[in-house]
Image: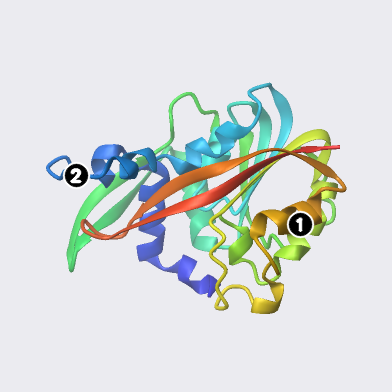
Amino acid sequence: MSEIYEDPTILAEYLLFHYGSEKEILLEEVSWPSGMRTALDFAVRTPGNFSNKKCQRGLDLGCAVGRSTFEMSRCCERVIGIDFSQSFIRAANQLKEHGTLDYLRRDEAHITTPLRATLPDAIDPAKTTFVQGDAMNLPKDLGEFDRVHAANLLCRLSDPGLLLARFPDLVRSGGQLVLATPCTWLENFTPSDKWPTGNTLDWLISHLSESFDLMKTHDEPFLIRETSRKFQWTRSMLTVWNRL
């Protein structure tokens, strides 16, 4: 199912999800539920759960079109963003190199609106590197990081346990790991024998507690606009871990 993330329509949805303003996502003439507004800027809010102390290296797994990677660069001297989608990585690199990327927001049927994704303010794109890669088969020489971020990734992997087993090697002692997952386990992404046998939080604790302290957990809502009348509103379970 990973090929869906190469679809130009999905690319446009993610550019809007990561870089769209409130007015571009929620039209002003409609009275939207307040919960939709609080679900905006997910790719800004999730890396905001890291400490604001300066650090050297950050890793953003499942970075999509790059907003969370750019946000991590506010405190990290170097950040690597990795995603399986070549289309997403091309878009992130174009934003890094040119600062903008034009795309079409789908409104209804063949009706579209031209929009422009723009790098957020006070970002140094030179601190970022974007590469296509597989979160279940990361290079052995990737090294250690002060911060590792993986948002809405685990339940899209065919074998998420492989990534969980790699986290102790990726996060250096005293470093931080931020995971977010909507726990939407689906067989077309993850075979059912690779799902948690109980709830997802207990499953994470069982895999990570030997190497990490769980510092906090809470829900982070997010909103993906498909058309002017159809949205995905979802709660993602966010956990913050400190490496022992």
| Dot placed on the residue nearer the N-terminal end, 2 or 1 | 2
Asked whether the viewer can see residue 41, the reply is: yes
**Residue 131 location, x and y as percent?**
63, 53
Say which residue appears at 43% left-offset and 32% top-offset: 120
Say which residue appears at 68% left-offset and 65% top-offset: 198
Q: Residues within 10 Å of mark 2 (few under 14, many from 20)?
A: few
In-image side of 177 versus 232 (left or right): right
**Residue 215 location, x and y as percent?**
71, 35
Q: Which residue was labeled with disc 2?
A: 27
Residue, far front: 198
Compared with 100, 138 (above or below) is below
**Residue 167 location, x and y as percent?**
79, 50
Residue, far left: 29
Asked whether the viewer can see residue 137, the reply is: no
- At label 2, which amino acid type do we have? Leu
- At label 1, which amino acid type do we have? Leu
Tell me the element at label 2: loop
| Residue 187, quarter of the rendered image | bottom right
**Residue 230 location, x and y as percent?**
26, 60
Say which residue appears at 52% left-offset and 51% top-offset: 236
Which image quarter is the C terminus in? top right
Q: Residues within 10 Å of mark 1 (few under 14, many from 20)?
A: some
Q: Which residue was labeled with disc 1?
A: 164
Cα distance between the residues tagged 2 and 1: 40 Å
In-image side of 49 versus 54 (left or right): left
